[in-house]
Amino acid sequence: MPILKVARLGHPVIRKQAELLTVQESQSPEIQRLIDDMIETMHEYDGVGLAAPQVHSSKQIAVIEVIQNPRYPEAPNIPLTILINPRITSRSKKIVEGWEGCLSIPDLRGLVPRNDSLACEALDRTGKPTKLEVDGFFARVIQHEWDHLQGNVYLDRMNNLNSLSHLSEFARFQLSSEEKDK
Ligand code: NI
């Protein structure tokens, strides 16, 4: 399975609304192979999620998984989740800020306000409708990936850019101050 090239911010595919798939399309060998390649690519780059536009395919597909991720060492584990045509059907009023990065915006982190919990409907990779009710980091990752499918990125969601940090400065100044807060 090949590792796909990741599109970066500035490539038009990142700013385009992705296309919905029919159930039949979702079951085609091409789409099933794309899903396998997206999972492989997410693993290769230590992503916690990946949306199809990030690998130059403007389709409504996102893959999510966290298993002791080195880019997000504090993040709870999330089982492998494939979302086709996801819709966020309800969102909590409670908003929480958390750090996000993005494989399409390398080397940066920023504090992003997100709904603390949500309900999401989608097709799974077998084309079956599924409903998820999640909170915390899982809800954050779904909102991040859903944004990609609409042509948005986390920078668009930040209240301001004051927290935007390069990764090494994030490790130096943000992580260490959070350690002190504990
Ligand atoms: Ni991203």
Image: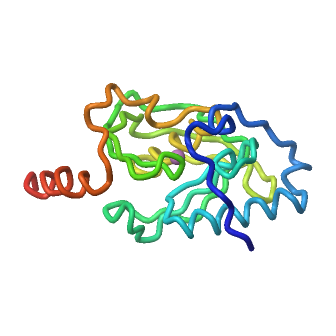
Query: Is residue 164 placed above or below 64 in the rendered structure?
Result: above
Query: Is residue 44 placed above or below 27 in the rendered structure?
Result: below
Q: Residue at x 90, y 57 (%)?
A: 28
Colour convention of the picture: rainbow
> Along the line of sight, which residue is nearer the eye, 102 or 169?
169
Q: Which residue is drawn at 55% across and 55% down?
A: 49
Residue 151 on image: x %, y %:
62, 32
> Along the line of sight, which residue is nearer the eye, 143 or 94?
143
In the picture, the quarter occupied by the N terminus is bottom right
Q: Of all residues shown, which one is farthest toward the left? A: 180
> Along the line of sight, which residue is nearer the eye, 149 or 26?
149
Residue 123 on image: x %, y %:
74, 48
Query: Is residue 55 placed above or below 68 in the rendered structure?
Result: above
In the image: residue 4, left or right of residue 174: right
Residue 79 on image: x %, y %:
54, 65
The image quadrant of residue 19 is top right
Q: Residue at x 87, y 59 (%)?
A: 30
Q: Of all residues shown, which one is farthest toward the bottom? A: 1
In the picture, the quarter occupied by the C terminus is bottom left
Q: Which residue is drawn at 44% across and 44% down?
A: 140
Tally of marks: 0
Residue 77 on image: x %, y %:
44, 65
